[in-house]
């Protein structure tokens, strides 16, 4: 049985908590958070503390707090030589205090407290400084995911960068699309089948093979029409940037 304590209870840790709580080989011993959290059913029996001096013994301590607070918080922990991991995609393992054994337990997914996710296919990226801790984190990850992979901090930083492009920036483009439709009293639901199909395509096609649209086929008339419709909208600069990049990438194939 792997004993786990959660340090912080944001989007990532709250989702990991729910997944590991029901894993057969894991015991969630405690949740620490600086602000009080009322644990709801079926988690009300999990011990909670906001007192850092009362954190219980565990095999793995999982930090899930803002990136810029990880270093100072890990240094403030009142114990040594324990396995401390964080869940951030862009923060190096070296950011953790070296008074404890250091590791990474990074689930590559977008999380919200209000939306449950299945961890079965979520990649969990792990890293440690010794093989024994690596085996422990691999075992912990495999209790909830079929995709546990060892990745260095350097490569994980690039992975996180790629994730920002395909997730955060893409979601902002959804917001732009929603605003354009909202101004015409059209529902965003009209775009959802297109969004779903675009995402589904990359299961069988590369992004290059799946690319369509006026920029790829150099449809000047449609591009000019779109720019006219955008007028002086702040979204015009995004349209122009993406159009020029796509024309450059696919220009030799036209």
Image (cartoon, rainbow, N blue to C red):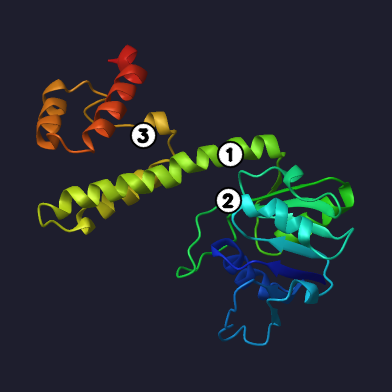
- Location of the C terminus by quadrant is top left
Report the residue at 33% width, 12% height from top. Answer: 252
Q: Is residue 177 above or below residue 144?
A: above
Give percent across and percent down for residue 221.
11, 24
* Comes first in the chain, label 1 or label 2: 2
> Viewer-proximal residue, 34 or 134?
34
Residue 123 visible, this angle: no
Give percent across and percent down for residue 249.
36, 19
- Location of the N terminus by quadrant is bottom right
Determine whether the residue tagged by mark 1 lies in a helix, strand or loop: helix
Do labels 1 and 2 touch, CB within 8 Å? yes
Label for residue 108?
A: 2
Give percent across and percent down for residue 60.
79, 63
Residue linked to disc 1: 159
Label for residue 210?
A: 3
Q: Is residue 51 above or below residue 210?
A: below
């Amino acid at each position: 049985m792997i004993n786990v304590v959660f340090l912080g209870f944001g989007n990532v840790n709250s989702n990991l908590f729910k997944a590991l709580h029901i894993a057969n080989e894991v015991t969630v011993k405690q949740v620490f958070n600086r602000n009080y959290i009322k644990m709801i059913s079926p988690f009300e029996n999990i011990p909670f503390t906001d007192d850092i001096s009362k954190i219980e013994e565990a095999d793995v301590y999982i930090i899930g707090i803002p990136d810029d607070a990880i270093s100072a918080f890990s240094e403030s922990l009142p114990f040594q030589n324990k396995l401390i991991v964080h869940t951030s995609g862009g923060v190096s393992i070296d950011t953790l205090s070296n008074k404890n054994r250091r590791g990474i337990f990074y689930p590559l997914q977008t999380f919200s407290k209000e939306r449950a996710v299945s961890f079965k296919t979520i990649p969990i990226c792990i890293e440690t400084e010794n093989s024994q801790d690596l085996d422990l984190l691999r075992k912990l990850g495999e209790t909830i995911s079929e995709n546990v992979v060892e990745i260095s901090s350097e490569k994980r930083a690039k992975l996180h960068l790629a994730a920002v492009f395909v997730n955060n920036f893409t979601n902002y483009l959804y917001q732009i699309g929603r605003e354009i439709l909202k101004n015409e009293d059209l529902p965003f639901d009209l775009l959802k089948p297109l969004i779903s199909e675009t995402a589904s395509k990359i299961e069988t096609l590369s992004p290059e093979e799946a690319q369509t649209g006026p920029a790829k086929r150099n449809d000047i008339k449609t591009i000019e029409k779109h720019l006219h419709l955008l007028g002086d909208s702040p979204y015009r600069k995004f349209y122009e940037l993406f159009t020029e990049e796509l024309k450059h990438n696919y220009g030799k194939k036209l």
